[in-house]
Structures are given as structure tokens and as C-alpha cells.
Image (tube, rainbow, N blue to C red):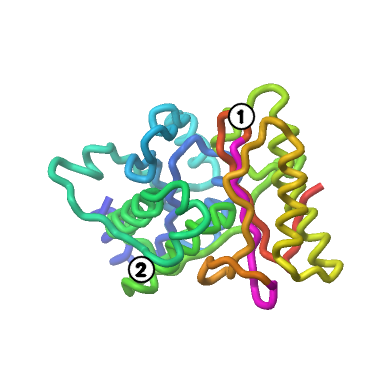
Amino acid sequence: MQARSESLRLAGKRIVFVPTMGYLHEGHLNLMREGRKIGDSLVVSIFVNPTQFGPGEDYEKYPRDFKRDEELASQVGADIVFYPTVDEMYPANYQTYVTVEGVTLNLCGQSRPIHFRGVATVCAKLFNIVKPHAAVFGKKDFQQLVTIRRMVADLNMDLEIHGMDTTREPDGLAMSSRNVYLKDGEREAALSLSRGLKIAQGLYDSGEREAAVIIEAVKNHISSYDTNIIDYVKICDTETLEDIDQIERESVIALAVKVGLPRLIDNYVFGEPLAIP
């Protein structure tokens, strides 16, 4: 992969990279379509990264279907699909990790303490392997996007990070590979996340700026479904990801909710359009 990328760079080609864990859906494909627009060569990686899964999480059960993924990536114009093994990425005696501090402490970092160390490490490795000029990430994983941007800036990595809006199902559910885990009857409960964001948007648009008021309204809606277990509902500064009491600058409301088996996340940056029915 490094040799292929080096030859593309020497030929003057702009490499755009979309890292994924596979089991592709329309959200991933939209990232690739954007990558196709902004570069000459599109590289897609498929790697279920074990270092970002904690004990008892769904690493072993995470959905995988490489042949399907390869075909979908090809259909949207991927030039290269990079598909390393775990042993290639983390060989014997591997001991080096990347830790991004402040922005990883809140939100998912509280219940998944090793997650972002794994994310930052694997992305740093992939950036060194693929040698892209730009990489495209989805805003659905908002904390991940902020973490990667922080790492790239702090370590003087020579690449651009592009964030793409969340791709949603027609009913408003944020697309996720984990949606496949939803059982019959749980779909309506899962929609409480996006509908909760719609409630938050409505309160903000009507002039509400007290974070606690908005959070309480969203929690009440999500909790009205018996299957839902809230991990967090928080309103944070979009740069530091620290909790705020008043919405006075660019802020995000971020949700993580266990709906039956899957743990789903979603978010909304106040003031932006929100395409939810």
C-alpha cells in the first residue's frame, strides 16, 4: 500500500482516503462519493480495529462481509480497497499507541475509556500507510471527528480532514452498521434518538439556550421507550467537547443510547439544518 501510494504521489495524483470498519452502508458510500469528487485516487480501508473495542463489546460479533463491501466500494469509484489483517496492523510485540487527551474524556470516553486511544492509533497508522492528501469522516461519530482533527493538528500531519453530514434512513435513523442488531419492535425506540434531536432543535429555534432544559426534554422523550438505556445526553462545545450550561457559541447535543443490544449514537450542531422527518 505504501509503495502504491508513493507511486501515485510521484505521478502528481491527489489521494483521498476513507477509513471504514466495513459492513458498508449508504453513509460510508456518501463519504466515498465525496472523496471521489475532491481527489484523483480514492483509497478505502476495511479493518475492524480490535484496539478500539473494550472488554465485553461486540468486536467478535461486529458484522463483516468483505465481498459485499468490495463490490459496493467499487461501484462508487474506489480505486484501491486496503484490507489488512490484525497481525499486519498489530504484529507480535506491538507496543506503541497514540493518546489524544482532553477531547476524548467526555461523552463516549466516559463509558469506553480505551476506545479513542484505539481510534487515534489505528488512524495514525493508516495515515502513515496510505499517505493520503485528505481523509473523509462522517459527522455522526462527532467525537471521533474532533479527536482525529486534534491529532492531525497536534502531530503536524500533512493532510486535510473533511467532515461529512450524517446520512439517515428515510425515517430519520442515523445509518450505522450496528442498526442490523435492532430486533423487531426496536426500530421505533431507536427513532427516539433522531426525534429527540428534533425536539432539541425546536427548543433552540424557539429561543431556549439553557442546556439543562433541552437535555431534560430530550431525555424524557428517549426514556419513554422501555427498551432504551441512556448512556448520555449532553450539550458540549464543539471544539473542546466540554459540557456547557448555556448555548452561547457553537455547540453540539450528543446522544448515546442502548436500544436493546446495539448502542447507538447521534448528534446535532445547533443552528444547522436537520433533515429528520
Whether residue 40 can be seen here: no
**Which is in the foreground here, disc 1 or disc 2?**
1
Residue 173 sits in quarter: top right
The circle on residue 39 is none
The range drawn in magenta is 246-258
**Residue that carries the numbered disc 2 in the rendered image:** 12
The circle on residue 260 is 1
Mark 1 element type: loop
Q: Residue at x 83, y 67 (%)?
A: 205
Q: Determine whether, in the image, residue 252 is placed left or right of residue 23.
A: right
Residue 47 locus on image (x, y percent): 37, 41
Residue at the top extreme of this rendering: 184
Name the amino acid, label 1: Gly
Crowd band around label 2 with a 10 angstrom C-alpha radius: few (<14), some (14–19), many (20+): few
Residue 255 is inside the magenta segment: yes
Name the amino acid, label 2: Gly
Residue 120 locus on image (x, y percent): 36, 57
The answer to which of 194 and 177 lies nearer the viewer is 194
Q: CA distance from mark 1 to mark 2?
A: 49 Å
Q: Determine whether, in the image, residue 249 is placed left or right of residue 275.
A: left
The answer to which of 98 and 224 lies nearer the viewer is 224
Q: Residue at x 36, y 63 (%)?
A: 100
Q: Determine whether, in the image, residue 14 is placed left or right of residue 206.
A: left
- Earlier sequence position, callout 1 versus callout 2: 2
CB within 8 Å, label 1 to label 2: no
